[in-house]
Image (cartoon, rainbow, N blue to C red):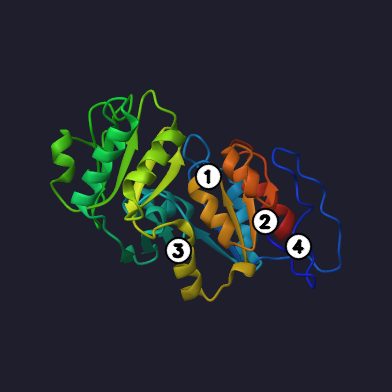
């Protein structure tokens, strides 16, 4: 939770996790955050991976008010490029859970971190040994700029055409940026905890979506990427409002001066958010932005 600036109007009445939004008291000065940081999947994007007309209009309000929208996503740049183009997005984006800083205007990666393959393979093996419940289903994102998504046969119920289906040994054939692991019978939190212990501080572990745990280079998270972007853009945490839905967004909301969890968010994120918005299917980001930026 964040302590509000006593000289500024509060952006909203803080709602308890799962509670409906309360009307914001009218004040002479309407609060405005110069930087609006949003996750993509489960937050800005609906389940069909589109940005609704209402959310597009709310983002236009942000721009009209002179504020900036910054995407902070777990997707690598190569995977989120199409969504950014469809939104007409310009400028910096934080991708790959904070491992990449991407200039969407120039279609160019400015920063990209890689994960040592031998270390990654060792973490996977130690995680499986600790769980004692059979092999993990695995995928990797190869190094930039290609950022190919390579998966083992049972990683997902349906393999998308753009994915590369490979044998397990082939996952480690080329430089990678992260490993994704899932287990069909073991609860996500147990898999994440086992991977944390196996990594012993040599890697970063995060829970990005249901049924998926990510292993990343040590020191990688969304707060690190957001700090890098904000420094370049000239913004501070106190000037930032952030939106997310999963545990990998905990650093994002923790860095920002005001953190909003979506109504569909993971309980761990709901517990630390300053506000709970409606779900991504109910245009929760737009609901909050309309309140903050209409007539700003």
Foreground label between 2 and 1: 2
Q: Residue 250, percent across and down?
A: 54, 51
Q: Earlier in the sequence, mark 2 or mark 3?
A: 2
Label 4 sits on residue: 295
Q: Confirm or deny contact between disc 2 and disc 1 (CB under 8 A).
A: no
Q: Confirm or deny contact between disc 1 and disc 3 (CB under 8 A).
A: no
Label 3 sits on residue: 224
On-image quarter of the C terminus: bottom right
User: Which secondary structure, mark 1?
Assistant: loop
Q: Earlier in the sequence, mark 4 or mark 2?
A: 2
Q: Residue 60, percent across and down?
A: 60, 58
User: Which secondary structure, mark 4?
Assistant: loop
The residue depicted at 48 percent of the width and 48 percent of the height is 248
Q: Residues within 10 Å of mark 2 (few under 14, many from 20)?
A: few
Between 233 and 125, which is closer to the camera in this rendering?
125
Q: Earlier in the sequence, mark 1 or mark 3?
A: 1
Residue 143 seen by the camera: yes
Between 254 and 13, which is closer to the camera in this rendering?
254
Label 1 sits on residue: 51
Q: Residue 157, percent across and down?
A: 33, 24
Q: Residues within 10 Å of mark 3 (few under 14, many from 20)?
A: some
């Amino acid at each position: 939770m964040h302590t509000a600036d006593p000289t500024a109007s509060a952006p909203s009445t803080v709602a308890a996790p799962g509670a409906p939004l309360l009307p914001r008291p009218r004040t002479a000065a309407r609060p405005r955050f110069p930087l609006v940081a949003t996750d993509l999947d489960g937050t800005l994007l609906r389940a069909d991976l589109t940005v609704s007309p209402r959310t597009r209009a709310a983002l236009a309000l942000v721009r009209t008010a002179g504020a900036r929208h910054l995407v902070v996503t777990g997707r690598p740049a190569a995977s989120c490029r199409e969504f950014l183009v469809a939104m007409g997005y310009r400028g910096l984006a934080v991708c790959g859970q904070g491992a990449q800083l991407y200039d969407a205007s120039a279609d160019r990666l400015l920063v990209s971190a890689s994960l040592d393959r031998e270390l990654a393979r060792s973490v996977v093996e130690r995680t499986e040994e600790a769980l004692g419940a059979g092999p993990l289903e695995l995928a990797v994102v190869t190094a930039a700029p290609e950022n190919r998504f390579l998966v083992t046969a049972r990683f997902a119920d349906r393999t998308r055409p753009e994915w590369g289906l490979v044998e397990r040994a082939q996952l480690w054939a080329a430089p990678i940026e992260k490993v994704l692991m899932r287990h069909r019978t073991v609860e996500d939190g147990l898999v994440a905890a086992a991977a944390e212990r196996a990594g012993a501080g040599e890697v970063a572990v995060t829970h990005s979506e249901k049924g998926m745990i990510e292993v990343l280079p040590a020191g990688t998270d969304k707060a690190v990427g957001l700090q890098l972007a904000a420094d370049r853009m000239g913004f501070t945490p106190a000037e930032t409002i952030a939106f997310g839905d999963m545990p990998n967004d905990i650093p994002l909301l923790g860095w920002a001066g005001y953190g909003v969890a979506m109504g569909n968010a993971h309980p761990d994120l709901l517990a630390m958010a300053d506000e709970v918005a409606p779900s991504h299917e109910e245009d929760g980001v737009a609901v909050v932005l309309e309140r903050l930026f209409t007539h700003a």
